[in-house]
Image: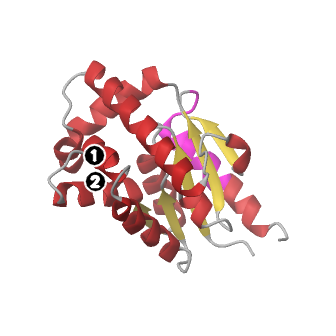
Amino acid sequence: MKKEIITICGGLGSGKSSTAKGVAKVLGFKHFSSGDFFRQVGLELGLSVTETNIRAETDKKIDEMTDQKLRDLNKENKIVVDSRTAYHWIPESFKVYLDLSPDIAKERILNSIKEDKLREQSEQVKTSEEVLKKMTERFESEQKRYWDLYKIDNTDKSQFDLVIDTNKNNLAEVVDIIVSEYKKWIVEKN
């Protein structure tokens, strides 16, 4: 049974959070960011987001907290979730993958960090080279954990209802595409 839930996945810097916020606003849905939740957990532990990811490789409680929060969202209605694993935990959701090359992503992330205090505290980077290095470490750590824990490969785009290249479309266009495709998807028979 389809749920009125949209899960947005994608690579680092692909625009998951900005897109999810935009889609939620247009549809009048709630928004949840597992990245923000994860960053907050890391800050409470006194760790950067990369350090939190690395610690999570050996401390399963970190992922368990985030994953339980995502599983609980399956009980919600009218919510947009940006997360690399929510599509797995909420399979009845409209599953979106945002695609972007790492070279473009690193500049977007650096700009985003400068505008967001939580990200600035948790990311601890100043240059695009540092961003690329941390992105790579974080991505590899996440992929290893997701595979080891759940046999999830969230880069397999065939698992998603919609894939969008966020370099070829600006934020407003991406939001419009998702809202339009979601509205078609939700009225189709299960």
- Residue 70 appears left or right of 99: left
Mark 2 residue element? helix
- Please name whichever residue, 50 or 56, is drawn nearer the observer in this view of the structure: 56
Residue 71: in sight, yes or no?
Answer: yes
Q: Residue at point 28% right, 30% down?
A: 110
**Few, some or many C-alpha atoms within 10 Å of disc 2 (few <14, some 14-19, many ≥20)?**
many
For the point 74% across and 44% down, which residue is it? 158
Up the image or down, 66 lies above or below 83; here it is below
- Residue 13 in view, yes or no: no
> Which residue is at a point 52% across and 72% down the rendered structure image?
71
Q: Where is 190 relative to 26, above or below?
A: below
Q: Residue 90 carries which label?
A: none
Stretch of the chain drawn in magenta: 168-180
Q: Quadrant of the N terminus?
A: bottom right
**Circles 1, 2 touching at the beta carbon (< 8 Å):** yes
Front-most of residues 41 and 103: 41
Instruction: Please name the residue that numbered disc 2 is placed on.
Output: 39
The residues bearing labels 1 and 2 have C-alpha atoms spaced at a distance of 6 Å
- Disc 2 marks a residue whose amino acid type is Arg
Disc marking residue 49: 1
Quarter of the image containing the C terminus? bottom right
Provide residue 16's location: percent of width, then percent of height: 47, 47
Q: Does the magenta stretch include residue 133?
A: no
Location of residue 168 by image quarter:
top right
SS majority, magenta: helix
Q: Is mark 1 on a helix, strand or loop?
A: helix
| Three-letter amino acid code of the residue under disc 1 | Val
Snapshot colouring: secondary structure
